[in-house]
């Protein structure tokens, strides 16, 4: 049994973490929920009963075995030394430590072993990376990935509850003929798409796009994997989708790829186009597994290429679920 | 001065055709508006004054020099012989004749000359093809395209007024907590995306995706161009966007590509990421030019590769505008 703390418990991901701890029957001895001073003292209804939110304190880490962080990079950076001092394992949803060599970046279905080499912190990958990686990894082991080209369709939940709130608010305003108010995204997102997530880098890619590159290489332990991404915010509430083209070392057919993906843990094959079944964000929302479908040989790379579509819940496999799965490695 | 008929005048594209005839100052002598029996007899307010809708008749073609069709493939197939018999030039928005060798498929900025080889019919390309081609053609002439990989973000207007109506209706129903009614698309489109446009083909691609392949090759007169596409319907009202990766024969920099695209007719360079300027469907809606931006060297193909994003009005350059531009070639 473990003493668990959730840092950032009232956010969209925080709430899902609590839910995943229950659904995965994580052996929780005590559960402490930490949030900002503003929320502290209020009570949160959880599957573990009503729990009073507490402000952050050294005591939280002293009395916890595992702390799952989802409160942004700054909070993670600030609290990491305290967590480490008290030998509390930090599982971090932020990107603060993901690119440090000594910090394992883990998707349990792919590189669980690397988690055990941690020095106090295990990093949880970016949502878009995690969702793509679920399909890419089994294809990589079976056929060898040479090139990976990704275009994303990312839900507003990627920006947390305030992202979803903004989409709903602007949509209502648009339908009512009112001026749309912009609080979170750079441009209106209602009935629009924005090819800009996170900050622009020197090379013209956004940081969100580079995260997919850096993190896939690190998780797969393939530092030279040829991979590129265009990341686009779209007016959906939850679950990210991705259009993916790969070139492979070894030849493959749609059937051989389907067979591999059918057996891949954490993947649900949704690929029956004759019955109009393929991955879609509204179906993938709330699901633990990542939907994969629209599998076909790519027209350019022929039998050494595949084109497919994935949808996965950004808040679950893209965040909370994967974090709790990492915690399970230490039970 | 020309006698012009618009077949399918009351549809979303038909109305834009009438508007484009005015905006491009097309030398209209007479304008006849043809629609289904249901609409016939009603009056349509147009920039040319109020015009009474008439049902289709042989007389329409007898008394017209040019008929612009946007009433679906079946109507086009049925009326083509009558139009030809009366030496009325048919400019066809449907896909009915696009793949016939003797029918020119024309984007005036790219292959205007081929239009003059017509035998009574000039075909107007698919919207997604036309929007991508505007950026791809000038890059092709400057750097030589070796591979083209496209993922689309297609508005509901691609399915005409009823597509837009469905998005608006379902969005209201969703926000009001009512059951969404599905009339046109295969699945709910409100707060969802559907990776399925037009019918599935033997090779696993949809017909919409293959149209981009077939038509780009035909318009560019590059029958072996390596090109693939994933076409996705998204919950926007108007203007399609596309995420495009190309490999080129000759090296290029983002700056050299920008310079080329800056001079390309029908293209508007919207590429100033430091000021959050990039193509977006809500900005591209109602514009004649196709927006191109997010230009960067692709991470995989290095200085022989480019990654960029386009948004263009599906009803304008993707349909009505291009059709009227074709008509202009015959003035």
Image: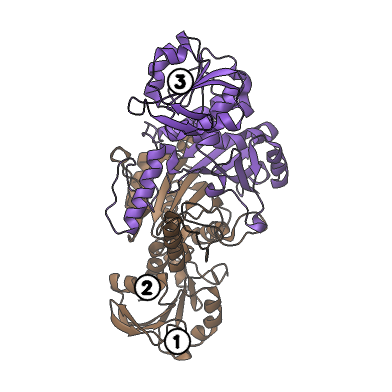
Chain colours: A purple, B brown
Say which of A41 and A212 sits in front.
A41
Chain-order first, disc 1 or disc 2: 2
Label 3 in the same subunit as label 1: no
CA gap between label 2 and label 3 equals 55 Å
Residue A27 image-quadrant placement: top right
Percent x, y for residue A230? 46, 41
Horizontal relation, residue B21 to residue B125: left or right: left
Horizontal relation, residue B316 to residue A315: left or right: left
Q: How many marks?
A: 3
Give the residue pinned by disc 3: A97
Residue at position x 44%, y 31% from top?
A44
Identify the image quadrant of the C terminus of chain B: bottom left
Percent x, y for residue A100? 47, 18
Q: Chain of mark 1?
A: B
Q: Going by the picture, which residue comes out furthest to the top?
A: A85
Say which of B135 and A213 sits in front.
A213
**Is any atom of residue B56 visible in this view?**
yes
Say which of B5 and A102 sits in front.
A102
Dot in front, 2 or 3? 3
Mark 2 neighbour class, 10 Å CA radius: few under 14, some 14 to 19, many 20 or more? many
Identify the image quadrant of the N terminus of chain B: bottom left
Residue B15's disc number? 2
Residue A160 image-quadrant placement: top left
Residue A89's disc number? none
Residue at position x 40%, y 85% from top?
B64
Give the residue pinned by disc 1: B55
Label 2 in the same subunit as label 3: no
Is label 3 in a helix, a strand or a loop? loop
CA gap between label 1 and label 2 equals 16 Å
Q: Chain of mark 3?
A: A
């Amino acid at each position: 049994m473990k003493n668990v703390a959730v840092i950032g418990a009232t956010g969209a991901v925080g709430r899902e973490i609590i839910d995943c701890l229950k659904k995965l029957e994580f052996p929780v001895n005590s559960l402490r929920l930490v949030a900002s001073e503003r929320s502290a003292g209020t009570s949160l209804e959880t599957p573990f009963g009503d729990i009073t939110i507490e402000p952050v304190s050294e005591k939280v880490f002293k009395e916890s075995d595992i702390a799952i962080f989802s409160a942004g990079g700054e909070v993670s950076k600030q609290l990491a030394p305290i967590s480490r001092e008290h030998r509390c394992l930090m599982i971090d949803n932020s990107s603060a430590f993901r690119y440090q060599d000594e910090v394992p970046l883990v998707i349990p279905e792919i590189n669980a072993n690397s988690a055990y080499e941690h020095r106090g912190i295990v990093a949880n990958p970016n949502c878009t990376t995690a969702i793509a990686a679920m399909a890419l990894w089994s294809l990589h082991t079976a056929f060898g990935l040479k090139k990976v080209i990704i275009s994303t369709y990312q839900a507003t939940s990627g920006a947390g509850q305030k992202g979803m709130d903004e989409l709903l608010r602007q949509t209502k305003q648009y339908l009512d003929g009112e001026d749309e108010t912009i609080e979170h995204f750079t441009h209106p997102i209602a009935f629009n798409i924005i090819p800009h997530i996170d900050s622009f880098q020197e090379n013209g890619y956004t940081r969100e796009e580079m995260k997919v590159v850096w993190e896939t290489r690190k998780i797969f332990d393939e530092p030279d994997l040829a991979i590129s991404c265009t990341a686009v915010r779209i007016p959906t509430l939850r679950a990210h989708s991705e259009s993916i083209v790969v070139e492979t070392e070894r030849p493959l057919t749609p059937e051989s790829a389907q067979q591999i993906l059918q057996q891949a843990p954490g993947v649900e094959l949704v690929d029956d186009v004759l019955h109009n079944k393929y991955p879609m964000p509204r179906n993938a929302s709330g699901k633990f597994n990542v939907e994969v479908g629209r599998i076909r040989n790519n027209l350019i790379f022929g039998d050494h290429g595949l084109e497919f579509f994935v949808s996965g819940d950004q808040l679950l496999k893209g965040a909370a679920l994967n974090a709790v799965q990492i915690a399970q490695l230490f039970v």
